[in-house]
Amino acid sequence: MAVYTDVQDEALRAYLADYDLGELVAFRGIAEGVENSNYALKTTKGDWILTLYEKRVEPAELPYFLGLMRHLAGRGLACPEPVAGRDGQALRELAGRPAAICTFLPGVWPRRVRPEHCAPLGTALAELHLAGMDFAGSRPNTLGPAGWRPLLEACRDSGDEVRPGLIAELDATLAGILAQWPAPGTLPVGQIHADLFPDNVFFLDGPQGRPRVSGIIDFYFACSDLLAYDVAVCLNAWCFEPDFSFNATKARAVLAAYVARRPMSAQERAALPVLCRGAAIRFLLTRLFDWTHTPPGALVTRKDPLDYLRRLRFFAGIEGDSALGL
Ligand SMILES: Nc1ncnc2c1ncn2[C@@H]1O[C@H](COP(=O)(O)OP(=O)(O)OP(=O)(O)O)[C@@H](O)[C@H]1O
Ligand SMILES: N[C@@H](CCO)C(=O)O
């Protein structure tokens, strides 16, 4: 459930008066998502998404996120485009929170990923990376390697309640990942999404009923980091079956479509296994943090950290990039 901040009809109408979006016809809170409050708006000029940024989003970072979305949308990527008010500002305030309206994207995210989703995903990811190349802004990856040890420390006291021995296993695995992490300057860097899970990618049926990407949303973890790390996030999030087995067919489809648009260097390919381990531990640690720090009775649904322990163990057991489908 993600409507933390209630918006009253009156307040929304007053807010919309600063835009050129016509009259409000209807609005409703969207239950999906856990970070921010989202509302679907219908006005006489179309459909929009209103987001109120909640406490996990740092207000000073919003110009980067909104600027990146505007840039990518301007390059033709199907992502939400922030809508400016009459004064030219997209970032405004509503109900005491920073707020913005973005374009509404059609389509639905895949509840069950099929191999046919994977090539369009790989293409869209490469297009996102290419479109971001000339973006002027930058933002460090606060959930990148430098953030993992502090997260693990924050889970040290209660982590083993989730699974006995978990913290010791993570201590050892993290040390190995950090020791092998690519040195700065060795791999291409750019603007990455950093959270490209199935629930952030919308699809519509394209020619012959094949799925095509109709929208990429939720840029609020986007940052400037290794492009290949974004690929590793997708291999984690899209290429495992419900029984946690790795689906090499899906991985091959993601990678082949990606490299057809943005070829990867030999160093990037060689680094993929450690990048996959890094991506697995990132989601394991943020989930473990939430699992051990969310008060009972809170409205948010906690995600199981152990799903990512399975992935981490899989990626720890592979030798080269051939097991990944390259
Ligand atoms: N531009 C958009 N067009 C259409 N629907 C959107 C758009 N942005 C968000 N939504 C809807 O709102 C839901 C929640 O959005 P989002 O995933 O960005 O929420 P969040 O709380 O910020 O993120 P998180 O996934 O990190 O919890 C999406 O699943 C989708 O249904
Ligand atoms: N995609 C993340 C949550 C939101 O960033 C996860 O599944 O843990």
Image (cartoon, rainbow, N blue to C red):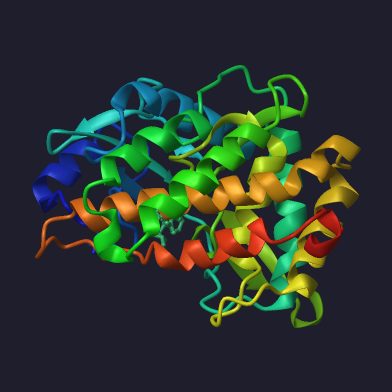
x, y percent for residue 181: 65, 34
Q: Is residue 109 visible?
A: yes
Asked whether, in this view, residue 182 is left or right of residue 43, the answer is: right
Q: What residue is at 54 percent from the left and 54 percent from the top?
A: 280
Q: What residue is at 37 percent from the left and 52 percent from the top?
A: 167
x, y percent for residue 248: 77, 71
Q: How many numbered marks, from 0 up? A: 0
Q: What residue is at 76 percent from the left and 77 percent from the top?
A: 210
Q: What residue is at 82 percent from the left and 54 percent from the top?
A: 321
> Measured along the vertical axis of the image, is residue 205 above or below residue 6?
below
User: Ligand 1 is in which quadrant of the figure?
Assistant: bottom left
> Measured along the vertical axis of the image, is residue 208 above or below residue 25?
below
User: Which quarter of the figure is the N terminus placed in?
Assistant: bottom left
Asked whether, in this view, residue 104 is left or right of residue 112, the answer is: left
x, y percent for residue 104: 46, 54
User: Which quarter of the figure is the C terminus placed in?
Assistant: bottom right
Asked whether, in this view, residue 276 is left or right of residue 13, the answer is: right
x, y percent for residue 22: 34, 46
Q: Is residue 265 visible?
A: no
> Measured along the vertical axis of the image, is residue 35 above or below residue 268?
below
